[in-house]
Amino acid sequence: MRLMLVEDSVSLADQLIPMLREHGYAVDWLADGRDALVKAHDDPFDLVILDLGLPGMGGLQVLRQWRAEGLGVPVLILTARDSWSEKIEGLQVGADDYLTKPFHPDELLLRVQALLRRTHGNVNDSRLRVGSLTLDEQRQSVWQGEQEMTLTGAEFRMLRYFMHNPGRLLSKGQLASHLYDNESDRDSNVLEVHVNRLRRKLGKGAIETRRGQGYVFIGGDG
Amino acid sequence: MRSIGRRLGISLFVSLLLAGLLISQGALWWLEREQREALSDSLRDDAAGVLTAIGRGQNDELTLDPTRLHPAYRRPLSGRYFVVEVADSRWRSRSLWDATLTLPGLPGMDEALQPGPGSQQLLRYRGEYRMNDQPVTIVVAQDYTPVMTAYSRTRTAVLIAWLVVLLALAVVQQWLLRRGLSPLRQARKEIEQLRGGQRNALNEDVALELHPLVLEINRLQRHTEQQLQRSRHALGDLGHALKTPLAVLKNRCNEPLKTADPALHALLEEQLGQMEATIRRALGRARVAAGVTASNRFCPADHVPLLLTTLERAHHRSLQVVVEGDQLPAQPLERDDMLEVLGNLLDNAFKWADSRIRLTLDDRDGHLHLCVEDDGPGIAPERRQQVLQRGQRLDERTPGDGLGLAIVSDTVAAYGGELSLGESAWGGLRVELRLPVPAAGSYSEAP
């Protein structure tokens, strides 16, 4: 899952980026509204965490323009402006959730997880489930029925992206762009290695390979 | 209170009345004088007429030839009389009958009226002539009462006519006054609407005299709006400036710190919590506008669904939310304030409710009644007052705190309303608000 963090406070960004990465998200950080406006079109972000008080261009204006341009990426507004009229304005412009500062870091993580789940169609479930597989995003592990399997960070990240997109054909490029931010090395061999490791843990049929096209995630019962 | 309309009306009426009385009295006086003038002319002619009837007899003495006299002198009490004195003889007109005519002492017109036969009032003229070297004194008199009767009838007619005209003038004047003052009434109505939030500004296309006033009111209104905008923005900026560092500190106050230095962690957490609560409460309090303009009126039909959508998105809980009375017309209460109040109340309800929330809106007897009920745990009666006063955190388990209720309480206080906490029918919390609504229809017709 690849996130864009638009926040002009360096110290806050310095705290949030490691925390988010630790929880398996690829994070691109931008501090200027105008940069964010362009950047959102360059890379396929799964979610944007947007501050409202930005230099260059206000967060609301950025969001309004994204929506006008037809960009549907889920947006979580992170702001100090906490009046209800401002919250409503934010959501009317097209934000999907709203978190006011100061906030508890866990709260941000929960909101991000919930928003991603909702965007991928799991509305009322508090956990990410595909077939018999259940992902524990706190512990970064996966449950197959009653059995818990530990995952490495890279495996967790990949499995989460697969589980958000079950049954869809995902090319290697697509996987890479959603799993790595601009600071990471992108090596398609590494992707294959992780896919194979996941197959070993979840069963051979969990991930199908379509030669020359990419992968399709089937789930634990495949 | 003094009324310009009434004062203008009274002074105009009085001036009309005075002018009318003066003119009519003057006219009547002048009329009477003319009448007397004409009468004295005719008396002088009468005296000359009598003189021509005096002739010389056979013995060269002076005699009066009755045939040459005006017939009225022969008809008894006809109202026209004469007395002629020649040497030692005195002739009286037959019309005098048995009455006597006192002669005025001086020649010419006698200004005073002399009571005559019957109830007649006589006007007399004394003429001195010489005939045959003898002095001849002729006094003619005429009854003045017919003139006086006619005069007083005229006076009555004039007075009645004048009263009718005065009445008509007074009515016309009132109508003119009303019409003249109607821009004032219109302006007052518009000010009422402005206050009630039904319009943004007063119409500037008004009478010349009102124009500066209307411009000034509009300027003040704009100024107030801008001031509110500015201070809200400044507060937002201040909030932003303070809360981001707070967020950084709060994030630093994490699990590793707790294991490394539990005392520091506890201290930081408590102090940061207090700072956050203080900032939020102060910002909330300062944000309350408690005034209203048309552009930002609270419109339940639009704003309540919006708020509910926002809350459902933020909480994503499957609760049964019932709303009653959200089809009320737009209320003259400030939109942001009402959103803040309802947002905080509903936010609490969404946090604490088990499965059901009910929001009731109702406007009756000049107040907007709001009621939010849930089926959550509620607040114990002895703690309710405490919650409103200090913005206490009631439960550490649910994110957010009791600050919402304190902000609501501040806003309600700014509006001069009432807030009461109670128990809902489902055993949860019931928050009831009663906010006075500035009546837009309080404008009353006054003269």
Image (cartoon, coloured by chain):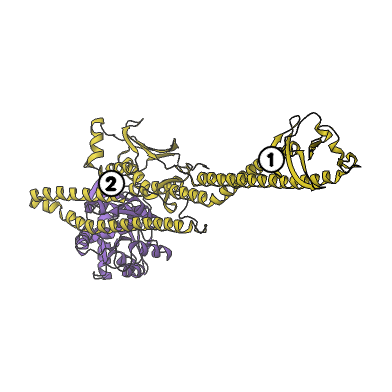
Chain colours: A purple, B yellow
The residue lying at 56 percent from left, 51 percent from top is B180
Quadrant hosting residue A186? bottom left
Q: Residue furthest right?
A: B58
Q: Nearer the viewer, residue A3 or B154?
A: B154
Labels 1 and 2 positioned on one and the same chain: no
Write the residue at 26% across / 66% down: A29
Q: Is residue B139 left or right of residue B216?
A: right
Residue corresponding to mark 2: A145
Dot 2 amino acid type:
Gly
- Label 2 SS: loop
Q: Secondary structure at mark 1?
A: loop
State whether residue B149 is above or below residue B198: above
Q: Disc 1 marks which residue? A: B105
Q: Is residue B310 visible?
A: yes
Q: Residues within 10 Å of mark 1 (few under 14, many from 20)?
A: few
Query: Toward the viewer: B380 or B22?
Result: B22
- Which of the pair B217/B1 is nearer the observer? B1
Q: Amino acid at mark 1?
A: Gly
x and y percent of residue B167 in the render?
63, 42
**B188 vs B69, nearest the viewer:** B69
